[in-house]
Amino acid sequence: MTNQESHEVVIIGGGPAGLTAGLYCKRAALDAVLYEKGLIGGQIAISKEVENYPGLQGIKGFDLAEKMVRQAESFGLPVIQKEVAGVAVGGEYHTVALAGGETVRAVALILAAGGSVRKLGIPGEAEYLGSGVSYCATCDGFFFRDKTVVVVGGGDTAVEEALYLSKLTRKVYLVHRRNSLRASRILQERLMSEPAIEVIWNTIITEIRGNGSTVEGVVFENTETGEKGESPTDGVFIFVGYSPNNRLVPPEIRKNGQGFVITDDKCETSVPGIFAAGDLRQKFANQIVVAAADGCIAALAAAHYVELRKGMREGP
């Protein structure tokens, strides 16, 4: 036996999935620790308002993240702001390498590193995030009831979100850089039959403008003619892709074609003792409540796995 630090469960990622996993691990009396390299709370910590988390009506994203952290810590979960450099699959223990050169061992690992929306990278996008710029219609569409919005993208997600927004807003402009959509045929048919949606072809958004506090318009450019212009809008919803933060996922773990981790209904990956929760995992919807549910399931499954391993070591 080495002097290397060991834990029953190591959680990587401090968003809703990781924090919920930590809460449930500690409630199960497990020796668990959570590592997060960035902002504790994940993407919700930078969300202006959260309206759809059950039981908490109209809470700011940062406040919800803080409540999750405090609750997990109140059960004794160490939340350590340190970057994880790598993960190695093992037999009795899996190994987590930290950026400072240290390594820790874990009987079970819960990967909850989340994902990242792809951004346009244009002026105004970051400035007005949460104040008119959004990457989630389900999360923020309510704030644009009876208003005019721009949706950017041409895939299934962009079309689905445009259709969703058309039920809430007065007008939706779907802006796509090409002259045809990538979305499935049935979604395109629904889109074209919706009178509240107008598709703007061969166009890119080059700037998002506002009054310093909210979005007021977008600057656009036609990709064929080069013609430029400006159009007023109350909000900009961007759906040009979503990528899982899978850099730390060991190669032994199965992923789908988009890089999301494939798990069973216990959130367990193809490697025994390694679980994936939240936006990193392949599933139907990416919502805060779903990520939290994943964290709960992964923690309960990890607790069961740890007990089985303990029984195997102790013998009959």
Image (cartoon, rainbow, N blue to C red):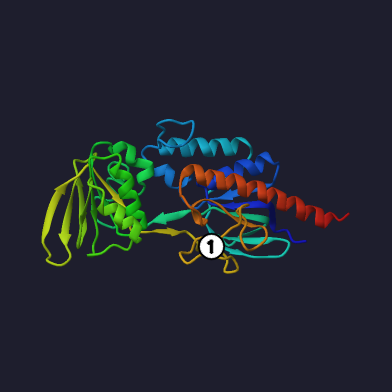
**In front here: 50 or 192?**
192
What residue sits right under mark 1 in the picture? 248
In the rendering, at what x and y percent does residue 104 appear?
65, 58
The residue shown at (66%, 61%) is 94
**In front here: 17 or 104?**
17
The quadrant of the rendering that contains the C terminus is bottom right
Visible residue check, residue 2 = yes
In the image, is residue 274 above or below residue 163?
A: below
The residue shown at (70%, 59%) is 4
Visible residue check, residue 78 = no
In the rendering, at what x and y percent does residue 215 appear?
22, 43
Please give left or right for residue 306 compared with residue 51 in the image: right
**In front here: 3 or 127?**
127
Q: Residue furthest bottom?
A: 251
Please give left or right for residue 152 compared with residue 102 in the image: left
Q: Amino acid at mark 1?
A: Leu
In the rendering, at what x and y percent does residue 258 appear?
45, 64
**In front here: 116 or 51?**
51
The quadrant of the rendering that contains the N terminus is bottom right
**Element type where label 1 sits in the image:** loop
In the image, is residue 157 above or below residue 178?
A: above
Please give left or right for residue 11 compared with residue 67 in the image: right
The residue shown at (40%, 35%) is 51
Asked where in the image residue 116 lies, by quadrant, the reply is: bottom left
Please give left or right for residue 53 compared with residue 213 in the image: right
Q: Residue furthest right?
A: 316
> How many other residues sit within 10 Å of disc 1, few (<14), some (14-19) or many (≥20)?
some
